[in-house]
Amino acid sequence: MPVREKFDEELAVLRGKLLDLGHFAENALSLSIQALENHDIELALEIMENDTKANILYEEINDYAILLIAKQQPVAIDLRRIIVAIKIATDIERIADFAVNIAKSTIRIGKEDHVKPIVHIKQMHAICLTMLNDSLSAFNEEDLKKAKAVADMDDEVDDLYGQTIVDLLRISGEQSERIPQITQLSFVCRYLERAADHVTNISEHIFYLVKGKQFDLND
């Protein structure tokens, strides 16, 4: 097999591992909100136990990328493809960690009824999932237009985050006995807001991959 063809196959393997990690994080995030909504402690525990799979995938990506660099000594965009895969894997692994954190908050809340419907939290979650899915597609296709559209969605999450925190603070003033739960729901909002920030990072990595220079898409 020609050297270039072999290298392209190895890059495809790396890309496949990264997409697997991304889909794992998507699923974990979805299950974490499902557990929160349904007060499902068993599901929350399962999410925490399964997180080792994300860690294993993350290590596999890093090890494979380092091996590729050492073996192929790539330059220019080929080197950026490998470096960006490592960077994106780090962001995705953090998103999977946020799913675990949401599961922990679910356990701490327990069976206590929510102080308010978690409508805004579910909206934040839905936007985060769309962002993550579209960012993985943008990476796979090296599509800057799609990457920019993903970054633009971060503002929607920020707005919902601010609105939800204001609502929770108001309720804490009226129902001081519910502050422990309100604190956990505030944490959940923060985890989703940070997850969206990490997806925005992924978009920035895609711009670096294609353009060869750093872009700040948070402006």
Image (cartoon, helix red, strand yellow):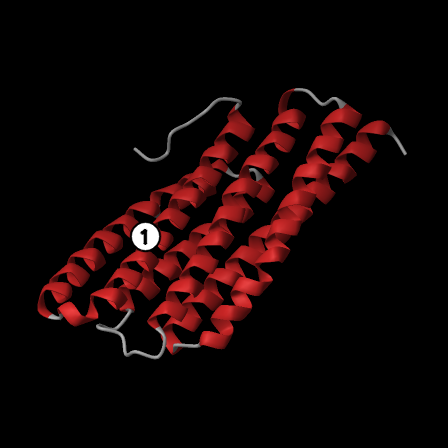
Q: Quadrant of the N terminus?
A: top right
In this rendering, position of residue 27 left or right of residue 166:
right
Nearest to the observer: residue 37 or residue 77? 37
Percent coordinates x, y for residue 109 in the rendering:
33, 71
Q: Which residue corresponds to mark 1?
A: 190
Identify the amino acid type marked 1: Arg
Disc 1 element: helix
Name the residue rendered at 38%, 43% in the picture.
197
Nearest to the observer: residue 153 or residue 169? 169
Residue farthest left in this picture: 174
Percent coordinates x, y for residue 50 in the rendering:
59, 63
Where 171 falls versus 211 (above or below)?
below
Residue farthest right in this picture: 1
Q: Quadrant of residue 181?
A: bottom left
In this rendering, position of residue 40 left or right of residue 15:
left
Percent coordinates x, y for residue 195 in the rendering:
41, 49
Name the residue rendered at 34%, 43% in the picture.
152
Percent coordinates x, y for residue 125 in the rendering:
38, 60
